[in-house]
Amino acid sequence: MTGQVCFKDVNVGDEIPRLVKEPVTEVQLVKYAGASGDFNPLHTVDAVGKLAGFDGVIAHGMLVMGFVAQALTAWLPNRCLKKLKARFTAVTRPGDIITVTGRITAKRPEENLIAGEIQAADQRGEVKIKGGFEAVLPGRR
């Protein structure tokens, strides 16, 4: 975060800072499996991914959700984020470059609350996650 985001500085229609991740790797999926405790072989064994109808392993949905949360908390302090919801819309595969974007859709001055939409998409524009967030921001610096 480069500076504190204040309620008065944010307007409906403003975009949040874009987050572009490095390509997802199979090693990253193994590390995420260990960190999360999700050892479903769909995420780590190529043959299982193929049996499931994919071209091989697929990323954990919650790994991509973590990218979404990373984009938001890089922009505003964790304590400001009050709600984050998401719908998974497509699978992510090794080699995919995930870009997280979003924009402000509403402001409620009585609460210093902002609401927005957010999504994660790959380099081909395929949306992996669509969601929304709410945050309570300080009134001024």
Image: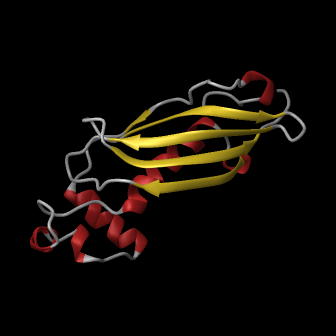
Q: Where does residue 4 sit, x and y in percent of width and height?
A: 71, 31
Q: Nearer the viewer, residue 52 or 1?
A: 52
Please identify the quadrant where the C terminus is shown: top right
The total number of labels drawn is: 0
Please tell me which residue is depicted at 90% across the width and 38% down the height of the picture: 110
Side of 141 relative to 12 (left or right): right
In the image, is residue 103 above or below residue 63?
A: above
Side of 136 relative to 89 (left or right): right
Q: Where does residue 80 sit, x and y in percent of width and height?
A: 73, 46
Q: Nearer the viewer, residue 5 or 49?
A: 49
In the image, is residue 9 above or below residue 123?
A: above
The picture quadrant where one finds residue 91 is bottom left
Q: Where does residue 111 sit, x and y in percent of width and height?
A: 86, 41
Please tell me which residue is depicted at 47% across the width and 56% down the height of the picture: 87
Side of 45 relative to 104 (left or right): left
Q: Nearer the viewer, residue 138 or 49?
A: 49
Side of 9 relative to 32 (left or right): right
- Colour style of the rendered protein structure: secondary structure
In the image, is residue 127 above or below residue 64?
A: above
Q: Residue furthest right?
A: 110
Please identify the quadrant where the N terminus is shown: top right
The picture quadrant where one finds residue 15 is top right
Q: Where does residue 69 sit, x and y in percent of width and height?
A: 53, 49
Please tell me which residue is depicted at 61% across the width and 53% down the height of the picture: 84
Please tell me which residue is depicted at 42% across the width and 61% down the height of the picture: 62
